[in-house]
């Protein structure tokens, strides 16, 4: 009998996804009868549409935009693609989520991408943005995440927005990891912002792109007039209800108290390796550490056998783990091969952290499960 069999798994992978909250589950259950098409004009359709529009208004208030300038998508990936796919020139870095990097690589084949340099601390420097935007053509977009999905490093979005404005470029911000964790006032200079629900204890399958300054996206899906024709396809009132409830539950102050739980884990791991990324400008719930003498995939597997869920790199279609492209771009392949991400959430307890540290101690000392 292993130690893990005596308790539920300890989930320390909140940056990957979050468990839906009880309020979200209740809201979705209450909306379960709203199966009608929100585009229909009959009573059932109008009820479903009311739920969708209520969620849109809540999100618009959070992002300080007009509700008409919020389009629902299937998630953050689609929102990022929708924002950037038609950029005349895209300025971004290898620090970004794959849904941005892949668009940049596609545009690069057409000569329409400029890559920002990546610094060892994983933080985008506004001076680098300014230099990269020299002689940039009209229709140029800069894309920078508000907070990195692997390291939690927070980028100076307000300063980058000022640079983009001076250079005549538009700024897109992937705020998927920032929603509910950061004061979003820094995003007021952004022309487009991507978010999703499942990072804030909402349902998977729904996200949004919001914009301002007349920066409406160009659709890449063709069909009906839903979402003002920018994202055709029937909306799901149940998912919208869940997203709305998740937005109602946002508590930034509560989230920042997670540093009290994160810091003991990081100190323990840092004594056995190196923390990856700027430790001053970052989210309070995440740490990314390269542990000396361990490959990341081996450590993740060993912890999983003991009932502790963390992550490393990105899962590919073959089911193996690739080195993190983010850490590789920052610190090289050696650090990347050993990089493990631990991310906590508002339901993480001190008892879970204590138990996880005991498991880490056993694993790194070479103890194996029975």
Image (cartoon, rainbow, N blue to C red):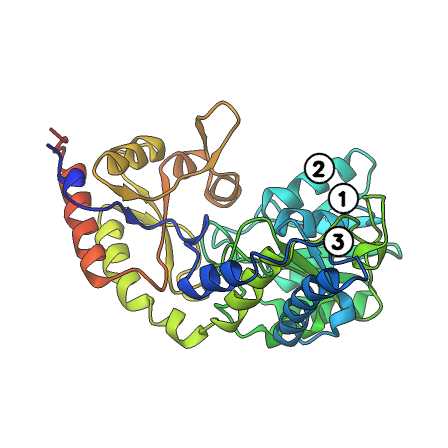
Secondary structure under tag 3 reads: helix
For the residue carrying disc 3, how many other residues have a C-alpha within 10 Å: few (<14), some (14-19), or many (20+)? many
Instruction: Please report the residue visible at 52 percent of the width from the left and 67 percent of the height from the top.
Output: 245
**Mark 2 and mark 1: Cα distance apart in space:** 7 Å
Q: In the rendered view, would you say 77 is above or below 127?
A: above
Kindly indicate whether the residue at mark 3 contacts the one at mark 1 (C-beta within 8 angstroms). Answer: no
- Decide which of tag 2 and tag 1 comes sooner along the chain: 2
Q: In the rendered view, would you say 63 is above or below 105?
A: below
Secondary structure under tag 1 reads: strand
Instruction: Please report the residue visible at 14 percent of the width from the left and 33 percent of the height from the top.
Output: 366
- Can residue 32 be seen at all in this image of the molecule? yes
- Residue receiving disc 1: 113
- Residue receiving disc 3: 83
**Mark 1 and mark 3: Cα distance apart in space:** 15 Å
- Decide which of tag 1 and tag 3 comes sooner along the chain: 3
Q: Is residue 367 left or right of residue 60?
A: left
Q: In the rendered view, would you say 365 is above or below 41?
A: above
Q: Residue furthest front?
A: 43
* Residue 187 rendering spot, x and y as whole percentages: 64, 71
Secondary structure under tag 2 reads: helix
Point out the frontmost of discs 2 and 1. Answer: 2
Kindly indicate whether the residue at mark 1 contacts the one at mark 2 (C-beta within 8 angstroms). Answer: yes
Q: Is residue 358 left or right of residue 161?
A: left
The quarter of the image holding the N terminus is top left
* Residue 331 rendering spot, x and y as whole percentages: 46, 43
- Residue receiving disc 2: 105
- In the picture, the disc for residue 355 is none
For the residue carrying disc 2, how many other residues have a C-alpha within 10 Å: few (<14), some (14-19), or many (20+)? some
Q: How many marks?
A: 3
Q: In the rendered view, would you say 235 is above or below 61?
A: above
- Decide which of tag 3 and tag 2 comes sooner along the chain: 3
């Amino acid at each position: 009998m292993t130690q893990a069999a005596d308790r539920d798994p300890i989930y320390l992978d909140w940056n990957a996804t979050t468990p839906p909250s009880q309020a979200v589950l209740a809201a979705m259950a209450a909306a379960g009868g709203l199966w009608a098409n929100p585009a229909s004009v009959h009573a059932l359709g109008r009820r479903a549409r009311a739920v969708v529009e209520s969620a849109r208004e809540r999100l618009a208030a959070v992002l300080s935009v007009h509700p008409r300038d919020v389009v629902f998508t299937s998630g953050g990936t689609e929102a990022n693609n929708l924002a950037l796919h038609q950029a005349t020139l895209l300025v971004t870095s290898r620090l970004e989520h794959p849904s941005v990097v892949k668009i940049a690589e596609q545009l690069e084949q057409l000569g329409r991408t400029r890559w920002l340099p990546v610094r060892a601390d994983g933080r985008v420097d506004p001076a680098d943005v300014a230099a990269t935007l020299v002689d940039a053509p009209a229709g140029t977009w800069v894309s920078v995440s508000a907070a990195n999905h692997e390291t939690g490093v927070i980028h100076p979005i307000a300063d980058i927005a000022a640079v983009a404005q001076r250079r005549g470029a538009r700024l897109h911000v992937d705020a998927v990891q920032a929603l509910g964790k950061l004061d979003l006032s820094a995003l007021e200079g952004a022309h487009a912002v991507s978010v999703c629900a499942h990072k804030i204890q909402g349902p998977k399958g729904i996200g949004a792109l919001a914009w301002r300054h007349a920066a409406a996206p160009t659709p890449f899906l063709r069909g009906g007039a839903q979402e003002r024709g920018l994202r055709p396809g029937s909306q799901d009132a149940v998912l919208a209800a869940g997203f709305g409830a998740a937005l109602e539950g946002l508590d930034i102050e509560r989230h920042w108290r997670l540093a009290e739980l994160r810091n003991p884990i990081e100190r323990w791991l840092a004594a056995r390796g190196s923390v990856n990324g700027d430790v001053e400008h970052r989210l309070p719930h995440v740490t990314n550490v390269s542990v000396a003498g361990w490959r990341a995939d081996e450590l993740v597997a060993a912890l999983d056998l003991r009932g502790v869920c963390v992550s490393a790199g990105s899962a590919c279609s073959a089911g193996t783990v690739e080195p993190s492209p983010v850490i590789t771009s920052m610190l090289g392949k050696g650090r990347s091969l050993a990089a493990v991400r631990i991310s906590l959430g508002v339901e993480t307890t001190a008892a879970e952290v204590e138990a996880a540290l005991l498991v880490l101690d056993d694993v790194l000392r070479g103890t194996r499960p029975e």
